[in-house]
Amino acid sequence: MRAATVEIVVWCAVLFGVTVVSISTVSPVELTVAGLASLGAAFAARRMRPAAGVRVRGIRCAARAAVSLPYAVVRGLAVLVSSVAARPAEAIVRRVRLRPGADAAWAGPLIAASPDTCVIGIPRDDVVLVHALRPEAGPVEAAVARTGGRR
């Protein structure tokens, strides 16, 4: 029961935040509508997740990967700029095998958040195909990969 309440509150907060940010001018009526709509959508999302068979798992490495994300974005942007400005891109495609405790559902978007990487496929729950502008693994890949990102 407590987990369901937390999930509904988180969904409601995220949906309310997205709605308020999307509104050009915020009035009390719009805040009321956004609050009621996000609450209804939060309950619907809570009911749909178990019906679809989706469960949150493999979050042991998520904190370490999330901490690496700002550095990965800045580093990736530098690699992207230097690739465009100095030389043609030496892009490669690599298969990243994820460590136990990491799941492709959250690791894929974290890896793809860096400007010099793109996740092009998730063939299994523990494997992510990455198109990258650099041969070595970035900080997020190193945090979630089984052997440092190259396999």
Image (cartoon, rainbow, N blue to C red):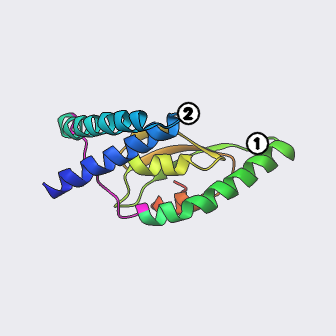
Res 17 visible: yes
Q: Amino acid at mark 2?
A: Ser
Regarding mark 2 in the picture, which secondary structure is present there?
Answer: loop
Closer to us: 15 or 145:
15
Closer to us: 3 or 23:
23
Q: Is residue 58 magenta?
A: yes
Report how far apart the C-alphas of labels 2 and 1 lie in the structure. 40 Å
Q: Nearer the viewer, mark 2 or mark 1?
A: 2
Closer to us: 123 or 73:
73
Side of 58 where 21 appears, left or right: right
What range of the chain is rendered magenta? Answer: 52-62
**Rendered residue at 45%/61% (across/down):** 146
**Rendered residue at 60%/60% (across/down):** 70
Corner quadrant of residue 130? top right
**Rendered residue at 35%/59% (across/down):** 59
Q: Amino acid at mark 1?
A: Ala
Mark 2 surroundings: few (<14), some (14-19) or many (≥20) residues within 10 A? few
Give the x, y percent position of residue 124. Answer: 37, 42
Q: Main secondary structure of the magenta part?
A: loop
Regarding mark 1 in the picture, which secondary structure is present there?
Answer: loop
**Rendered residue at 65%/46% (across/down):** 115
- The residue under label 1 is 89
Mark 1 surroundings: few (<14), some (14-19) or many (≥20) residues within 10 A? some
Give the x, y percent position of residue 58. Answer: 32, 57
- The residue under label 2 is 24
Side of 75 where 15 appears, left or right: left
Q: Is residue 150 magenta?
A: no
Q: Are marks 2 and 1 in contact (CB under 8 Å)?
A: no
Side of 51 where 94 appears, left or right: right
Closer to us: 123 or 20:
20
Give the x, y percent position of residue 15. Answer: 38, 41
Side of 107 where 125 appears, left or right: left
